Structure formats: structure tokens, C-alpha cells
Amino acid sequence: MPKTKLNLRFAQYRLLRRLFATIAATRHPISVTSASGHLDWPEVICYLVQHMKEELIEMVGTVVDKQPNAFFKVQINDTEHMVLATISGRMRRNRIRILMGDRVDLELSPYDLTKGRITYRHK
């Protein structure tokens, strides 16, 4: 198997080390080499996209107020917490309308609990 020299910046090197450590730690590790023994980069990138995203907090709430530019104020169920939420791209593409009083599913980032994304409107 021929060795290739890679010119990587430190951040890219750390990212690749983290990727391979994650692959090695999984219960069902993926094969990141092709039949020729070289790295299969499309498979590595797909693995990065699927498994290294930040975990989102999923909650259910009720739309309280409509704001300009497709923003909504949503009250999380059983609490007084208010979130400024926008509509997800799939809901925009399918032209799903959201009205005040609708029950919706939200995704919140663990870094900012005051902003979110509406992913589903309950009937």
C-alpha cells in the first residue's frame, strides 16, 4: 500500500484524528478504505455529516405570536419559556402555514435556548 503525504493544517489534522477515533469507537465501524487501500473520501465526508452534527434539543410548544419575516414566538409546553422560532426549509418548501395557537415541534440548539426552528405542525 503506497503512503501518501498529506499537507494538512492543524485544524484539519485534529478533525481527521477525531473522525478516525469516532469510527474506531463505533459498534459498527464503517470501512473508510477502498479496494485499492486508499481513503474513500466521499464515505468519510458522509460519515462526518451524519454523525458529527451537534445534538439538537427537541421540544413541543404552542405558537403565541407571529413576527415579521416568518418568525414566531413559541411557548414551550408546561413552562413559561418563550422561544423565537423560524420555519424549517422543508416546511417553507411545502408551504405549510402556521397560525397562532398551533402545536409545533421545535429544535433548539444547546448553545442558545432562546432561538429555534419549527420542524412540524401538529394537526
Image (cartoon, rainbow, N blue to C red):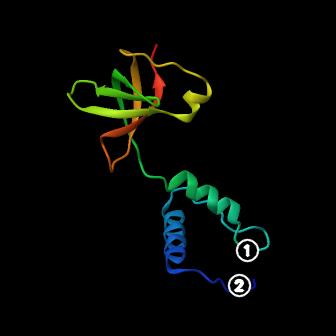
Q: How many marks?
A: 2
- The answer to which image quadrant residue 107 occupies is top left
Q: Nearer the viewer, mark 1 or mark 2?
A: 2
Q: CA distance from mark 1 to mark 2?
A: 9 Å
- Between 56 and 29, the residue placed more toward the observer is 56
Give left or right: position of 18 versus 59. Answer: right
The crowd level at tag 1 (other Cα within 10 Å; few <14, some 14-19, many 20+) is few
| Kind of residue indicated by mark 2 | Thr
- Between 67 and 59, the residue placed more toward the observer is 67
Residue farthest toward the left in the current orientation of the protein: 80
Question: Taking 42 as reference, is 104 above or below it?
Answer: above
Q: Are marks 1 and 2 in contact (CB under 8 Å)?
A: yes
The crowd level at tag 2 (other Cα within 10 Å; few <14, some 14-19, many 20+) is few
Give left or right: position of 117 versus 47. Answer: left
Question: What percent of the width, then of the height, locates residue 20?
Answer: 54, 69
Measuring 27% from the left and 24% from the top, which residue is drawn there? 77
Measuring 33% from the left and 27% from the top, which residue is drawn there? 74
Residue farthest toward the front in the current orientation of the protein: 68
- Between 114 and 58, the residue placed more toward the observer is 114
Quadrant location of the N terminus in the rendered image: bottom right
Q: Name the residue beneath numbered marker 1.
A: 38
Question: What percent of the width, then of the height, locates residue 61?
Answer: 33, 25
| Kind of residue indicated by mark 1 | His
Give left or right: position of 78 versus 108. Answer: left
Question: What percent of the width, then of the height, locates residue 118?
Answer: 44, 31
Q: In terms of secondary structure, where does tag 2 sit? A: loop
Q: In terms of secondary structure, where does tag 1 sit? A: loop
Q: Name the residue beneath numbered marker 2.
A: 4
Question: What percent of the width, then of the height, locates residue 113?
Answer: 30, 42
- The answer to which image quadrant residue 31 occupies is bottom right
Measuring 56% from the left and 58% from the top, which residue is drawn there? 48
Measuring 23% from the left and 32% from the top, which residue is drawn there? 81
